[in-house]
Image (cartoon, helix red, strand yellow):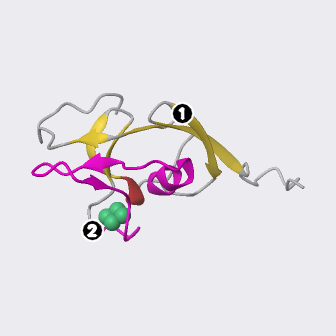
Amino acid sequence: MYATRPEARPATVEVLVDGVAVLVPAGASAAAAVLLAGSAAIRETAVSGAPRLPYCMMGVCFDCLAEVDGAANVQACMVPVAPGMRIARQLGARDALMPEAGR
Ligand code: FES
C-alpha cells in the first residue's frame, strides 16, 4: 500500500545499472542499486584488474568507484539514486581530468 500524503516520496526509483533497469528504494545509494542488480563487479582495479563490489557502504574503501551519469570515479555509496540515473562499471584507472558528462 502506497502512502497517500502528497509530500511522501515515491517508494521506488528506476535506475540503470550497466544498462539494465533496476528498481531501488527511494533514498538508497547508487552502490545499493549495484548490489540489488546482482552485478558481479562494479569496477576492476587499475593494477591487477581484480573485480570489486561495494563493501563498506560509507565512503571508506573506494571499492564502489563507478561511472555515474557519465562521471568517472564516483563513490557510488555516497550518491543517492535519482530517477533515470545511469550507473556503469568502471574498468581500470580513469583520467582524473576526464570531463564530467551530464553534470
Ligand atoms: S563502498 Fe566503500 S567507499 Fe563506497
At which x and y percent is residue 29? 49, 56
85 sits to left or right of 24 = left
Q: Residue at x 20, y 30 (%)?
A: 99
Magenta stretch, residue numbers: 30-59
Label 2: which residue?
A: 61
94 sits to left or right of 90 = left
> Is 23 in front, or is 51?
51
Q: Quadrant of ligand 1?
A: bottom left
Amino acid at dot 1: Val
Query: Is 55 a magenta residue?
Result: yes
Q: In the image, which is nearer the foreground, mark 2 or mark 1?
A: 1
Mark 1: few, some, or many residues within 10 Å (few <14, many ≥20)?
Answer: few
Figure check: 85 above or below 37: above
Amino acid at dot 2: Cys
Mark 2: few, some, or many residues within 10 Å (few <14, many ≥20)?
Answer: few
> Is 41 in front, or is 25?
41
Q: Disc number at residue 72?
A: none
Figure check: 55 above or below 44: below
7 sits to left or right of 76 = right
Q: Residue at x 27, y 68 (%)?
A: 61
Label 1: which residue?
A: 20
